Amino acid sequence: MANSDIKENEDFYYNEQGYKVFTEQFHLKRGYCCKNGCKHCPYGYDKKTDTFKQKNLKK
């Protein structure tokens, strides 16, 4: 995914500290977990335990 494909307010936003925060939509578009413990990780990764939590999938 090229940087030009990333859209502000859709794929990311800036938090109060000025950091770029990627959205769940961005992570799903990327298609894999980076294991950085992202705030909106749709894959259920827990950085503290280095494990994936079971996520309830919406039907």
Image (spheres, rainbow, N blue to C red):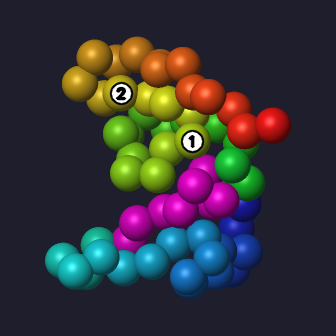
Name the secondary structure under disc 2.
strand
Write the start and end of the magenta stretch as one range. 20-27
**Do the residues bearing badges 2 and 1 touch, measured as CB atoms within 8 Å?**
no
Does residue 25 appear to the left or right of 47 in the view shown? right
Left or right: where 53 falls relative to 11: left
> Is 41 contained in the magenta span?
no
Quadrant of the rendering where the C terminus is positioned: top right
Report the disc number at residue 28. Answer: none
Residue situated in front as seen by the camera: 58 or 45:
58
Where residue 18 appears, as percent x and y from the top left, is 25, 80
Q: Residue at x 72, y 60 (%)?
A: 1
What is the tally of numbered marks visible in this picture?
Answer: 2
Q: Is residue 2 toward the left or the right of residue 34 in the image?
A: right
User: Which residue reaches farthest front?
Assistant: 59
Q: Can you say whether 23 is above or below 56 in the image? A: below
Task: Name which residue lies at 47% across and 20% down.
Answer: 53
What residue lies at 45% left-to-right and 77% top-to-bottom?
Answer: 13
* Three-letter residue code for mark 2: Asp
Q: Residue at x 50, y 38 (%)?
A: 34
**Vertical placement of 28 versus 51: above or below?**
below
Q: Position of residue 32 (x, y in %)?
A: 64, 37
The label number, if any, that marks residue 42 in the structure image: 1
The quadrant where residue 57 appears: top right
Q: Residues within 10 Å of mark 1 (few under 14, many from 20)?
A: some
Looking at numbered disc 1 in the image, what kind of residue is underneath it? Pro
Nearest to the observer: residue 58 or residue 12: 58
Which residue is labeled 2 in the image?
A: 46
Residue 4 drawn at (x, y percent): 69, 80
Above-or-below relation of 43 to 15: above
Q: Secondary structure at mark 1?
A: loop
- Mark 2 Cα-neighbour bin, 10 Å: few <14, some 14–19, many ≥20: some
Say above or below: 28 vs 20: above
